[in-house]
Amino acid sequence: MRMCRSALQSTRVGRRLSNIGTCRFSTGIRGGRIEERRLRALVVHPRLPGAKEALLSWDASEAVSLARAAGWDTGAPWEDKGEAAASSSEEEDSDELSGDVDAIDDVGAYIARLERVDPRFFFHLKELCRVAVQVARHGADLLFVNASLSPVQQRHLEAAMDLAWRAQRRQQKHDMGTSDINQSRIAVFDRARVVLAIFARRASSTVARLGIELAEAQEVKAKLGAGMVSGVTSQLQQVAHALGRLPGCDKLALLPRSGGARGVTTSFTSSPQITRQKQQRAIDEKRSRLREEIARLQSARGSRRQQRSRDERQTIGLVGYTNVGKSAIVNRLTSSDLLVEDGVFVTLDVASRRCVLPSGRECYVLDSVGLIQGLPINVCEAVQATVQEMHEADVVLHVRDIAHPAREEQAELVREVLADAKIDMERVVEVWNKADLVMQKEVRHLHYLHQQKDPTPVYTVSALTGSGFPQFLEGLQKLMEDLAIKAVPGFQSSNAVQVPQSGWCTVRMPQDLSKNQASDLWAFLHSDSAADASVSTDEVTGEVRVTVRMSDSARARFLKRFGPGMLS
Ligand SMILES: Nc1nc2c(ncn2[C@@H]2O[C@H](COP(=O)(O)OP(=O)(O)OP(=O)(O)O)[C@@H](O)[C@H]2O)c(=O)[nH]1
Ligand SMILES: [Mg+2]
């Protein structure tokens, strides 16, 4: 056994990496092979005053989805819920702190009801003890608090989780005679950190990976600023007291001999301030190195964007809360096969596809990274790229899951992000997806309510069945044409061109056109409106006539460039 332990400790997987994205954990060596299992997470959803009770279970299940997207096991510890409750009923009777398994709801999250947020631990003391007991009892490898934690709260929670970790080891020793399992301490994640863990796990591009490294460096710096664990000894003793009731544990054995927890016992060779300054300097240097590298790589992405704008095709960007069906809509519009899955953050990078509108006009459609409450927009490169792309899109489709109970909250968050990014709301159109899951009557009612507040048209579609797409495409085309006309120089000024309705028209090509003029004209007709073009020659005058279907915007551009003489 000793051999196994040392071999295990010497492997990278044996120790949990400090990196945000770690999701696997070695449990030992059997038959010469390292056995791995997924990290177990205790998902704690804090229920704070003011939160909608009706959305409680959705919010908790979203937290569980986030943990699963990070690659963590959220189910296993709770499957023996009844068993755990029965076996420990004796202790629970004697102490309400160690009970409360009912607080783990059907979706697998522990619901912590809080009156207010504690500045030191996030949870009030009683709830903190409960959380620690849950973590210890179920052998969780990490704690995910579905909220935003300050660096101080994170540090203090880590100290409390150290006690839970000691309790886990003692329990294992008590039950199995060994405490080899779970060599690593219990990490604490808040919502932003989990999002980063998801991106870290699945980041495929170099920019994305560097972005994660930058976020990690920022986090380490914030933690340094939070200082040491101090002034919470009595609270930690209370936690140890609650944990001491678990089988094989006793309060005194849980508290570290120095009387503190991780952070308190750290020894410094020089003064703490000097060491911290040195560490901060090193982190700052790393951050500026990473920023430079990211900027360099992003300029390459910028030139790809310029390439798109040079070929004059308009761009439609899709934005929306995660899991609303953005990729499914892009697939339907462009006959692509982008990954579509039920879960959060399935799409982790912006993708561009070509789409042909009913008029035959081509444009680009951009799928994007979904947004979510508590998303660390400033540190997540992929999310920043999404916002940037939306900024440059001609039309932004705000996709909403109309069947979701939290659809209004989700929409509000997206609108806030668009407003923060100063995206012109005139270019934003709402697309209500998943209409197949909602009764027609309800959709009509929702339309009515929407129209009371906002007269801009919304499109109701189902990416699954294709319903609503013909009207959606027509509306989209019209909007893009209107926007293109506005973009024509001179529009709405004193010498603005007169733009007739779109449709068929005839271009008469005089015989005295120079070679250059003729080729220019043909190039224009070919690129902008050549679909269904037919060419004839007047037998008497020899004039060439091209009958083409032109959109309003193409017609406006034609008139600007070649004048009204040739068009009828
Ligand atoms: N019933 C129904 N399900 C849909 C519809 N559109 C998408 N879905 C489902 O919704 C889930 C999410 O779809 P995606 O297209 O991956 O959603 P997304 O917005 O791209 O999600 P992220 O990339 O994670 O932000 C998948 O399970 C789809 O099958 C729809 O119109 N009706
Ligand atoms: Mg997607």
Image: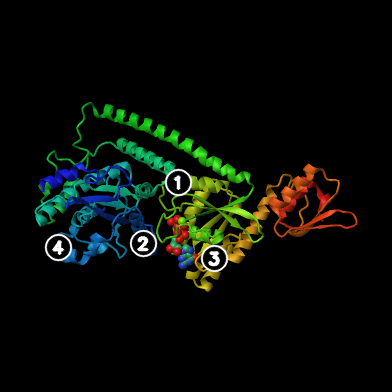
Q: Earlier in the sequence, mark 4 or mark 3?
A: 4
Element under disc 2 = helix
Q: Are marks 4 and 2 in contact (CB under 8 Å)?
A: no
Q: Is residue 90 visible?
A: yes
Which of the two discs, 4 and 3, sits closer to the camera? 3
Q: Residues within 10 Å of mark 4 (few under 14, many from 20)?
A: some
Q: Are marks 2 and 3 in contact (CB under 8 Å)?
A: no
Which of the two discs, 1 and 2, sits closer to the camera? 1
Amino acid at circle 4: Ser
Amino acid at circle 3: Val
**Mark 2 = which residue?**
56
Asked if residue 290 lies left or right of residue 512, the reply is left
Among the 4 quarters of the image, the one containing residue 67: bottom left
Q: How far is disc 1 from disc 2 in space, using C-alphas?
A: 29 Å
In the displayed structure, 22 sits above or below 62; it is: above
Q: Which label is found at residue 382?
A: 1
Q: How far is disc 4 from disc 3 in space, using C-alphas?
A: 51 Å
Amino acid at circle 1: Ala
| Disc 2: residue Cβ within 8 A of ligand 1's nearest atom | no
Which of the two discs, 2 and 3, sits closer to the camera? 3
Amino acid at circle 2: Leu
Q: Residues within 10 Å of mark 2 (few under 14, many from 20)?
A: some
Which of the two discs, 1 and 4, sits closer to the camera? 1
**Mark 3 = which residue?**
461
Q: How far is disc 1 from disc 4 in space, using C-alphas?
A: 46 Å
Q: Earlier in the sequence, mark 2 or mark 3?
A: 2
Q: Residues within 10 Å of mark 3 (few under 14, many from 20)?
A: many
